[in-house]
Amino acid sequence: MPCCPPPRTGVRDEVVGAMSERDDLEIGRWVRLADPSPPISAEIAKRVEAATRAHWRAEVARRRHRVQFQRLAALAASLLVVAVAVSAWKQLAPSSTAPVRVAIVIDEAWQRGPDGSRVRLVSGAEIAPESEISTGSGARIALALPSGHSIRIDHDSRLRVLSGSRLAIDRGAVYVASGAQGRITGPPLILSTPSVDVREVGTQYEVRLEPDTTRVRVREGSVRVETPRATHPVDAGTELGIAADGIVSRRSIESWGAEWAWVGATAPVFEIEGSTLRAFLDWAAREGGWNVVFEEASVAGRASSIILNGSIEGLPIEDALAAVLPTCQLTHRIENGRLSIRSADDQEFGGS
């Protein structure tokens, strides 16, 4: 029995659409043009025509299904790439909605919100964006930023919290300490003054506004001080002064001493419970601006294995050292920027 010839090759997919009445007529024409020998009955011809039509429709449906599947697969792959990228970004970037919190308050400090409302600050309070913080003559305050920065505000100061990575000081002094050992989890902090922007590079530094000069003192790491005229890198152990007339001066400074004493008074409490002696000493040295020196090699070897218990909450750093070290059979002395540690049975060594 003769079979119907297949449709002409080269027909574009766009032409293969929903079966129309015209398509049915075309199929009938192919059937009638088939070799008439030997003759077939009208019933058989009708069956062949119906079978051919069904086969063609199935082929059209199959092609459409394949195209739709390919498009859906491509879309799914694209969505997967986007999902992975968003997930990675969330892991690397701190939450932009994480609040700035008050860590320590000494005496009275106040927050003025964007709506003009004024509230007294207490430990644990959240600082709203665009808020202004002010301290009186006897007050100091410490803030904890989502990035891990510790911000200490001296007395008679005014600071505006623009975002979690940008602050502006209008009066007084602010001290910035990045996360432990200079680690931060967000963009570098920018501290703006009326005349300069100070951009950190993993550091500890102080910005102090005086009547005719802005002073930037770097204790650890480095910063970039950006003025309308130039950018000035400032490394540890350096103070940069920018006078009102634009004249820039530099001088060497120590990382320890009376000028830094106010910073230690607002240091976040170190949780000694379960911490090692070495971690405690590193914290104390960083807050005090000292270098840790072990007078005996045996003490240095044990410092990382001694586990501490208790709490030093409410104790100044030097008092905390005096309270903790004797429990480890150790004593200490602070002199010329050195925090020296030695066994307590050394009668000549003595305390600080």
Image: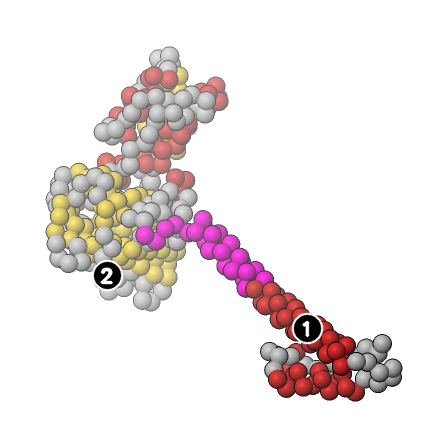
Pointers 2 and 1 in contact (C-beta within 8 Å): no
Asked if one can make out residue 279 in the rendered structure from this viewpoint, the answer is yes
Residue 144 appears left or right of 49: left
**Residue 194 - label:** 2
Determine if residue 171 is in view.
Answer: no
Can you say which quadrant of the picture contains the C terminus?
top left
Question: Does 164 lie within the magenta span?
Answer: no
Of the two numbered discs 2 and 1 on the same chain, state the one appearing first in sequence. 1
Q: How is the image coloured?
A: secondary structure
Q: Nearer the viewer, residue 307 or 341?
A: 307
Coordinates of residue 32 in the picture (x, y in percent) = 77, 86
Residue matched to label 1: 54
Quote the CA–CA distance across marks 2 and 1: 81 Å
Which residue corresponds to the image point at 37% horizontal and 29% vertical from the top-left? 280
Image spot of residue 225 (x, y percent): 34, 57
The verdict on residue 96 being magenta is: yes
At 23% from the left and 52% from the top, the residue drawn is 128
Range shown magenta: 73-97
Residue 267 is situated, as x and y percent measured from the top left of the image, at: 28, 37
Task: Name the residue furthest right.
Answer: 38
Classify 344 as above or below 227.
above
